[in-house]
Image (cartoon, coloured by chain):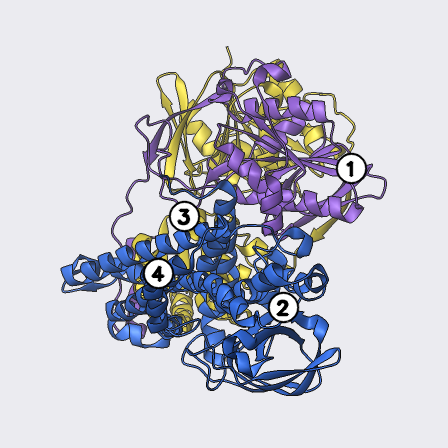
Chain colours: A blue, B purple, C yellow
Amino acid sequence: MRIELTSEQQMIRAMAAEFAQEHVAPIASEIDRDARFPHETVKRMGELGLLGIMVPEQWGGAGADAVSYVVALEEIAKACASHAVVMSVNNSLYCDPLWKYGTDEQRARFLKPVAAGHALGCFALTEPEAGSDARNQHTVAVRDGENYVLTGRKLFISTGREASYALVFAQTDRDKAHRGISAFVVEKGAPGFSVSKTEDKLGIRASDTAELVFDACRVPAANRIGEEGRGFHIALATLDGGRVGIAAQAVGIAAGAYERSVRYARERKAFGVLIGEHQMVGWMLADMATAIDGARLMTLKAASLKDAGQPYTKEAAMAKLFAAETAMKVATDAVQVHGGFGFIREAEVERYFRDAKITQIYEGTSQIQKLVIAREVLK
Amino acid sequence: MKIVVAIKQVPDTATQVKIGGDPKAIDTAGITWIVSPYDEFAIEEALRLKEKRGQGEVIAVSLGPDRVKEALRSALAMGCDRAIHLNDPAWANADTLATAQALAAVIKQEQPALVLCGRQAIDDDMGAVGAQLAEVLGWPCASWIMEEAVDADAKSVRVGRQVEGGLEVFDLPLPAVLSAQKGLNEPRYPTLKGIMGAKKKEIKDVKAGDLGLTPAAPQVAVKNLEALPARPPGRVIQGEIKDAVKELVRALREDAKAI
Amino acid sequence: MATAYWCIVEDDRKGSPKKVMAEVLGEAGRLAGANVEAVWLTDKASDEGIKQLGAWGASKVWVLENAAFAPYMGEVWVPALAELVAKESPKAIFAPVTSRMREFVARLAARLGAGLSADSVALAMEGDALVATRPVYAGKLLAKMTWAKTPWIATLRPNVFKPAESAAGKSAQVEKPSVKIPAARMKLVERREEVSTGLPELTEAEIVISGGRGMKGPENYVILEDMGKVIGAAVGASRAAVDAGWRPHRFQIGQTGRTISPKLYLGFGVSGAIQHLAGMRTSKIIVAVNKDPEAPIFKIADYGIVADLFEVVPALTDEFKRLLDKS
């Protein structure tokens, strides 16, 4: 067994790393402080092909694989977790299902502009009473001739405010419970569709997390993705891919915090020696490096299974669980390595610490990942 | 319009370089290789020229061992149409002149209207190949160019070359050789599509014999590499700013005799 | 037998050799004793200039004076000088590193089929052979270079070699050889002068002040220029400052900018990234002012002050003023 990126994957990583260090890293602190969405750099990410990595060229994407996607996403996340979540949502939660379940006509209308980076997409599943329990959908879609009429609220939707297209899940048949859920693309500006608020958050502050309201919003039947009642299946399959993306984001956050810690440990002296030479700090760095390597390998494994067309639900959940826990632990220790300096904004590790937390929560909390893994193990 | 861009693969600036077992060369283990940054300005300028004219071909050429393919692949990912790899152990000790002669032989076959290169490669920093290439070809050249514009019928190029205190603007008849200075443009990143498409493009391997060349013995050679002499330990001047500044000026005057 | 060491003259384009020629002639003299000759391609050579070259140690000055030599064009200069080289077979050809010499000497070496050591920082005889030392890999290592045959062709980094003392008594024999001057295919359109800062040119200055990211913005460089005026220093910038758009690229010191080697370098708010060090690490005395005690520049600085540059710079300018008023 050889673990080696192909020449293309290496070039993609190098490009993403260079772009991230030169254009994303310099603004990361400022956009975090101001909770400002980075339109300019997100647009450039689209031009570079980072927003539609796995979509075939015919549909506006780059035609690369999931491994390319995770190595690029890690590099972006290393510089800024907010950019990374926008990238992850667009690639995994919007483009992926549109490519997989959309008709050619739907791909041309709803996928191509988003994969090419001209517009952003979002994924609207979570509701006030449907978080971890995603089956409990209250948003309804009632068929009315050639349209559906959507009514309900979606909560904590990443890129919800900035997206031009939302992939929305709603109940078309309440009696069938989660087998009565269907998926729709709703375009920004559709009558009855509005963004009611944007959340003020602990981390990933430069990305927007919004509440979407559907007030008798009429959506053409042609916007339904997949058959009626296939929505929940689409959502779950999409989240498998999404988890690989969040795992990559978490690895990037951990790697960014770790690299800062190593640099600091090489420069800062205490009791007459570099702090890295103190055993307790050295141990923390060793633990960080080991966990990050493990998380990265698990993420790459899940991605390569996806590329091979093999089942990867369990591996995606494991990678996401382990990477998220690693990100939180590493970022916490990174603040500790920096001591008092780590607690102030200038050192930047506190941003990684705040950003890491969300990776344990969104696209399935760590607890939900364990449920998924357990279910797979007991199959 | 056909354009040849001559590029060199060099160690990344941030890479630690160590003298190798053979003290004439560095230890290449663990080195990250990149396209020399000035060459990226040359590639970018060639691509912009092609895009502006709506037609043409950009060919990247490089001399070096097998690993140089990666650099050529990067050039293809940025948008060059094809690549030529001067790959022959006979060139292992090529100095700038032997390199210029090899490049000139390929360029004579390709007959481009313009040759672009970087003002220098950031490994040995000799900065000679562009000018020497022009001499071997017998073409006019302009070094350290900051701006460039080819006329409508691709007969001449107007360039601004950086000199002390200003910019000298020249018209050169084509074909000509130009070396790029930073400031000429902002090189693009390869896009994902470009990277994915690069593997479908041709990288042609060329040996000295294919060009009818027998590389001459180098005219200059590295006898050995040496580490920099250590600087004497510095001194951080402590105290109130007012006093520190006074002490600094005294030391510069009396100890260092630098002012 | 070829014995002469030729020094190609860089001039101020107004008929006088540049000061850097004292360094080139001085080094050639150290290696070759009396066998030092100056070669001057120019549209106008002043008598004072020729005298100056003699005073710096040239025993002979070859004057190739022709309107076609200005402005410098490789395709005109190279065949003209190559013809003279063929006739006279000098043992070595040296020139200072300047924008045009860099290209000219490289092109000449190709014409002659000879070896070149560009940007040399030391020259020494080992037995009968010349050995040049030149920085490589962004100045992280030094390479010792040898030639396969003469002429030994080298360019010399300014401010590194010990200049010849000007000896008023010495005078040079003047030769005005006739050489064929080819027609130029390239044509000068215009020369755009940079807005003069009133300060010395970066690569020629004996003292260079540099401002980095710590300068916080373009408007603050005026405090460095004020200091520059007091001590006669050029003002440069780090890549971070240039990339931020605070200073034009021509002021950039470093790997993708200018390489400098002044007697005194003063860095303010410069962190000392590898790529900046590549352009200034051969400076003789390095002073660093930065409020971050961990800034890498302190590792190579001779003198450092850990403080806010905005407090240090005005105080230092005043102190320099006081010192220079006294002397």
What amino acid is found at the position of numbered circle 3 in the picture? Ala
Say which chain tag 4 marks: A
Q: Which mark is residue A21?
A: none
Which residue is located at x 57 percent, y 28 percent? B85
Question: Label 2, on which residue?
Answer: A227
Image position, residue B55 (x, y; %) = 79, 42
For the point 22% across and 62% down, which residue is it?
A284
Determine whether the residue tagged by mark 2 lies in a helix, strand or loop: loop
Residue A154 image point, x, y percent: 54, 83
Give the answer, above or below, for where A33 lies relative to A27: below
Q: Secondary structure at mark 4?
A: loop
Q: Is residue C272 left or right of residue A26?
A: left
Marks 1 and 3 close (CB-CB < 8 Å): no
Label 3 is found on which chain of the structure? B
Q: Are both tags, 4 and 2, on one chain?
A: yes
**Disc ID at residue A379:** 4
